[in-house]
Amino acid sequence: MRDYLLTLCVTAAVTYLLTGPVRKFAIATGAMPEIRARDVHREPTPRLGGIAMFFGLCAGLLVADHLQNLNSVFEQSNEPRALLSGAALIWLIGVLDDKFELDALIKLGAQMISAGVMVAQGLTILWLPIPGVGTVALTPGQGTLLTVALVVLTINAVNFVDGLDGLAAGMVCLAAAAFFLYAYRLWYGYTIEAAAPATLFAAILMGMCLGFLPHNMHPARIFMGDSGSMLIGLILAASAISITGQVDPDALKIFEGSTREATHAALPVFIPLVLPLTIIAIPMADLVLAIVRRTWKGQSPFAADRGHLHHRLLEIGHSHSRAVLIMYFWSALIAFGTLAYSVHSTSMWIVLGVVALSAIGLVLLLLPRFTPRAPRWAESVVPPRYRRRKRASAEPAEPSGDAGGAEEEQEPVPAGVNGATALGHRSRFPDRSKAGARG
C-alpha cells in the first residue's frame, strides 16, 4: 500500500506542477476556443490540460517501475506498456482536437485504434465469469470486439460528462478510488498477482485527477479538453479490462461447498462484471440519454446540445458548485455501494444504507423546487436565496438609445451557472446560437 500511495503522490505532484506551465502554453498557442452555445463558462478558458495529465501518467509508471514491490508488475505483465501505447495515441489525437477541432468520426476512429493497440499488446478480455454458468473463455475475435466496445463507451461517457468545472476529474477520481480498493482486495486478500496491474492503473488515475482538480475547480483556470477526458477514460477502461478479463475466477477456489455458500463467495468474481459499469453509471446514462434525445430529434448523435444531466441540474436551480457536488454524491454512492456489497453481501445494513442515502440524494436534488422563504423580520440574517423578492418599481426606466434616439433592445440571457449568466448582456458574444459546437 505504501508503494501505491507513493506512486499516487508522485503522479499528483507532477500533474499539479505541470498544469501551470501548460496553461501558459495553451494561451500562447491560442488553444482557447470561443464560448460555444452549450458552454456554461463566461470567459474563454485554455484547454490542453491533458498534457499535464499525460506526463503525470508517465511519471507514475516510471516511479512504479523503480519500486521493489511494484517492479514485478512490469516484469510479469506487458499491460503497463500496452496502456502507455494506447494512452499516447489517444492523448495525441486529443491534443490535436483541442487545438484544431477534429471531426467526431476521426476521434471515434482514433479511439478504436487505441483500443486495438492495447489488444495487440495483450491488454484484452480473455474470459468472462458469468453467474450460473461459470468461466466462459472468449475467442480472440470476441475478446477484441468486447475490449474495443468497452474502451470506446468509457471514453465517450467520460467525454460527455466533462461539462462543468471539476466534474469529469472528480467523478473519475471517485470511480478510480472504488476500483483501487476492489482491485487491491483481490491482489492482497486473495494473493492474485494478475490484479496488480489494475491496482496500479487505478492509483495512477487517482493521482492524475487529484493533481489536476485544484486548477479545474470552479472557477476553472484551465480545462482538461479532449486530450484529458479521453485519456482518463481510456485508463479507466484499461483498469476494468485488466481486472475483468485477466483475473481467472478459478484462482479464487471458491466454487466449493453448498450452492448458497458458493454463490455468496463468488460475488467478488461476479462484481467485476458490474463494477466497471457502476463506476461510470452516471456518465454512461448521460451518454445513452444524449444519443436517444438527439436521434429522436432527427439530429446526429454527435451534435452538441444543452440537455446533459449537469445542464438539467443548472436549469432546476442548482448553482455550479452544488451541481458538481450532487454528481459527485451519486457517483460515489453507486461505486462505493457496489464495492461494499461485494465485501459483505449478506449484510442488510449495506442495502438499507444505500437506500437511505439515495433518499437523501433525491431530497438534495429537488431542493431548489421547494426553496423556503423566510419571513420579513428574518430576511437580514438568512442567505439571499431565502429572501422574498422585492417588487419592481412601477416607474418606467428612462430609455437608453444610440445617437439616433432608438432604444437598444437587450438580448435575454439564458439561465446559467451560479448566477453568472444573469449579470448582464454578453456584448462580446451577442448571438450564442451561431457559436460553433462540438459533439
Image (cartoon, grey):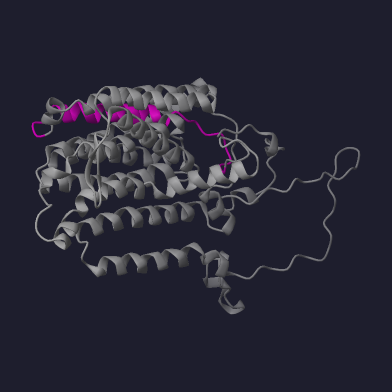
x, y percent for residue 46: 49, 31
Most distant residue in the front direction: 133
- Foreground of the two, 232 or 50: 232
x, y percent for residue 402: 85, 39
Q: Quadrant of residue 84?
A: top left
Asked whether residue 9 is in view, the answer is: no
Q: Is residue 108 left or right of residue 34?
A: left
x, y percent for residue 197: 20, 35
Which residue is at 68% across, 38% downward? 432
| Quadrant assignment for the C terminus | top right
Residue 57: in magenta span: yes
> Does 353 sit above or below residue 62?
below
> Does 346 sit above or below residue 75?
below
x, y percent for residue 105: 52, 26
- Foreground of the two, 245 or 190: 245
Residue 299: in magenta span: no
Q: Quadrant of residue 435?
A: top right
Which residue is at 9% across, 54% downward? 256
| Quadrant assignment for the N terminus | top left
Q: Is residue 10 left or right of residue 394?
A: left
> Does 258 sit above or below residue 94?
below
Residues shaded magenta:
40-69
Asked whether residue 151 is in view, the answer is: yes
Q: Is residue 136 left or right of residue 44?
A: left
- Foreground of the two, 245 or 210: 245
